[in-house]
Amino acid sequence: MSASKVTPWEVQGNIDYEKIIKEFGVSKIDQKLLERLEKHAKKKNKPLHHLLRRNIFFAHRDLKFILDEYEKGNKFFLYTGRAPSGHTHIGHLVPWMLTKWLQEVFDVELWFQFPDEEKFLFKEDLTLEDTEKFTQENMLDVIALGFDPKKTFFLVDTKHADLMYKEALKVSKKITFSTAKSAFGFTNDQNLGAIFYTAMQAVPSFLPCVIHKKKIPCLIPHAIDQDPHFRVSRDVIPKIGHHKPASIQCRFLPGLAGMQSDGKMSSSLDHTTIYTTDDPKTIKKKINKYAFSGGQSTVEEHRKKGGNPQVDTSYIWLTFFEEDDKKLEKIYQDYKSGKLLSGEIKAILIEKLTSLLQEHQKKREKARRNIDTFIFKKT
């Protein structure tokens, strides 16, 4: 079993989420918070999101503050993003799925950042032309999820630099190189752009306050590996007159080879990754060939001993994408008892993802006409 590593730019190995909670200093999402979220969802005739019900979103910073403010009549706004370096894979969709639910339940704005300079600064083989191309492609996947175009604003760092740079300077003045080294593991040979970058990532968490000229709480849904950026931001942002941004963190969707071997799904490992643009044949081939199985070595042994859903990639992925709790529970019990074979649970996942992505791809193509609608324009 490989040792784990979790940074904003690299995730490897078997992830111990209890350890991450302690090391990062985040709080567990408890039952009281889930009940409060569910109460607001019911007002919109929605169930509590399955990503919350199943503890896939498992940690937070100041979620109670966000709900307290909302219940006093003070609306918050949402902020999340995507650093473009390749095509969108289904792991990227996970935090956006909950973000869309939060937008619908609380009727709030979403500010979606495309920091098209980040991966250029951190990856030797990427050009700014590459990240510009992938920004356009990634935008299609966000739009395809169905965010409200009247309440969703895309920020592209190189395009909105005139709007963001002044605010990023205020942030950067409060962050020392010593803090950056401690938070991100930088060494003295790190390029200057990478050191400054976290100041740009902080800006959308208070930019609407600057635009609207009032203090508005911010909630950031994201995968847990991005927490170091916002940990630093939370210390700095109150010093320049804004609320600390709150956040809610999710677990990683593992690559097909399983969490123990390759950490979260990665665009750099094509064979263990399902992209939103993959066709049905590719989806089937990748899952059948590479999905780690929790089954036994023979059919006879599997029927007798049953499989282990906890390590089976197909089952783990279904916990992220199969919304029906009863259906998921039946799959779990049938697989554990040996009634359901490894090939059969793979077939269930193939059917689920094929259906999901074919529908997504239709919406993605329609989104090409609407990109400009979502890009923030100064008035």
Image (cartoon, rainbow, N blue to C red):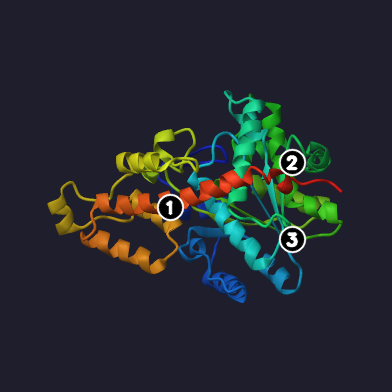
Q: Residue 278: which quarter of the image?
A: top left
Residue annotated with mark 2: 175
Residue 80 in the image: x percent, y percent? Answer: 64, 50
Residue 244 in the image: x percent, y percent? Answer: 72, 56
Whole-angstrom CA distance, mark 1 to mark 2, is 46 Å
Left or right: where does residue 19 sit relative to residue 32? left
Residue annotated with mark 3: 217
> What residue is at 67 percent from the left and 35 percent from the top?
116
Residue closest to the eye, 142 or 73: 142
Pointer 3 or 1: first along the chain: 3
Any mark on residue 104, and which? none
| Three-letter amino acid code of the residue under disc 2 | Ile
Q: Residue 2: which quarter of the image?
A: top left
Left or right: where does residue 140 sit relative to residue 240? left
Residue closest to the eye, 162 or 166: 162
Left or right: where does residue 252 sit relative to residue 332? right
Mark nearest the camera among 3 and 1 is 1
Q: Is residue 104 visible?
A: yes
Residue 185 in the image: x percent, y percent? Answer: 59, 35
